[in-house]
Amino acid sequence: MIEKIRIKGYRKFRDATIVPNPRFNILVGENAAGKSTLLEALSLALTGRINGRPASEELNPYWFNQDDVSDFFKAREQGKPVALPEIQIEVFLVDREEFQRNLYGAHNSTIPTRECPGVCLRVIPNPDYKGEIELHLDSDTSILPVDYYMVEWRSFGDVPLFARPKEITTAIIDSRTIRSTNGVDFHLRQMLSDHLESSEKAAVSLAFRAVKERMTTEHLNEINQRMGTLAGSLDEQPLSLAMDQSARAGWDSSIVPHVAEVPFGMAGQGQQAAVKIALAMGHKASAAQVVMIEEPENHLSHTSLNKLLHHIEDLAVEGQQLFITTHSSFVLNRLGMDGLLFVTNGQISSMASVSPETVSYFKKLPGYDTLRMVLADRFVLVEGPSDEILFERFYRDIKHKFPIQDGVDVISMRGLALKRSLELAQALGKRCAALRDNDGKDPESLLEELGDLREPGLREVFIGKQGFGQTLEPQVLKVNTDDHLMRQILGVTERAVLETWMTNNKTDAALKIAEATENVTAPQYFIKAIEFITDGNG
């Protein structure tokens, strides 16, 4: 439903364009990278609200991109004419019939001009307060005068919006926290209301008013007779009590959902999140078209998270778009790598280039920690735990520090196909070294099989030397020829065959070498990989 999002000047995003996946969008990134900010911006543009309140009531100088603000005040100090920072959030919608009537137009930032449906929210200086703004800026301040700003919310047809367009239904579920003390926040109440027909809501409202009227006439009658005798009003009219019949005391603010007969607010936070998601994605007639979920893994065990992801997949209906932030590789793999949006430094990149076969491959292996690849500056792929342990040891010997101290993450593929892992590295565009055994084959033929998954200077594969053994253990022994020293390090007697013992006890052998104080020489392909991943820098 959403074709494109453009955010200018809002918090982390100086100028970012996002082309979302039509179904699942999985937002990942470091803490404070801007994942939640992206959902917040999308919600602002679609609903005109933030934290359940109109945007105009929540204006904050820290909404504005701080680089924009800093550049503005520097330019003013230098006497340069410069416009005040603004915020603009545009949501471009797919060209569907239901959007044509009220949301269609050419009032958007597309160049050349393009007519399409969409909405735009801008936070701009109010021209009626031009003098007050100048007085504020002439004072010794570096804070924007948001008191003199206004929120302008319009369709692409340049029609002002005052409430969420009825053509766009949204739901926001924050699994990290509960926003109100009783657990029934603005968004949940809105979702509950969306699941009722107008006739049902009217019937419940009338019944609720009748109950309150009966409370007033029957149960408060005796109290009101006594209160009528009290003096106090200016014109000596009698005092009385009555149930509030105003809209603010409507039935929807008085009910509390229950889960297994327990009030919703007293249910576990994981359970609350699951209920909100189910309501938001419910049956087709009332399902929200845009669903935003913050960190669904919070407060859930692995088993419960697996159940929740099953529910999300089962409940997703045609035309429904999900935006999900997560720190969980399990969530990312299960819902599909092709929906990944990597958020960093106010920019968003996608993984749309990953093949359907590789997406399916990782869906079947949801426990694999793909997020380590996504979040790493540079990474090294090794075949198993023993390779990982020895790479760390040899890296410390050569660089005198741990790999992670240089921003290098060493990731064990643990039996995963090297081609699949390299395809992810290719899609991420990150510097990657991969180490593998030669398995008795010509290294050149193994490299040829990888095709363009290798890229000189960016993705390289390093293979154990032919003739030095098929696996890591004989490769280590071939460059460490002091048999007595190696037996001493490994604690192996003369009766045992050293290579056989190491091969049968891969992890134990690697740990003993890693802990040894004696010098151990690294195989040449390890040395080359270390030099490559550090770009030859010490």
Image (tube, grey):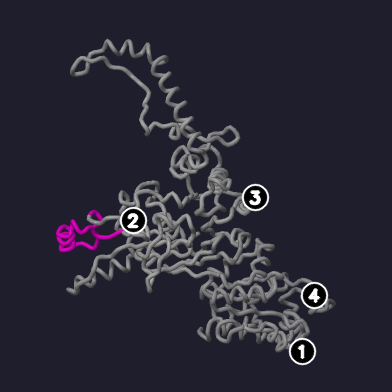
Of the two numbered discs 4 and 3 on the same chain, state the one appearing first in sequence: 3
Picture quadrant where residue 136 is located: bottom left
Identify which residue is drawn at 67% across, 65% down.
360
Mark 1 crowdedness (10 Å alpha carbons): few <14, some 14-19, many ≥20: few
**Element type at mark 3:** helix
Whether residue 277 is visible here, answered yes or no, is yes
Q: Which mark is residue 501?
A: 4
Query: To which residue does mark 3 refer?
Result: 307
- Kindly identify which residue carries mark 2: 159
**How far apart in space, not on screen, are marks 2 and 1 (Cα)?**
75 Å
Determine the CA span between mark 4 and mark 3: 44 Å
Segment tinted magenta in the rendering: 123-147
In the rendered image, residue 231, in percent from the top left (x then y), is placed at: 23, 13
Mark 3 Cα within 10 Å, few/some/many (few <14, many 20+)? few
- Distance from disc 1 to disc 3, alpha carbons, whole Å, reads 50 Å
- In the image: residue 412, left or right of residue 431: right
What residue sits 48% from the left and 34% below the top? 201
> From the viewer's perspective, is residue 226 above or below residue 170?
above
Query: Callout 2 environment at 10 Å: few (<14), some (14 to 19), or many (20+)?
Result: some
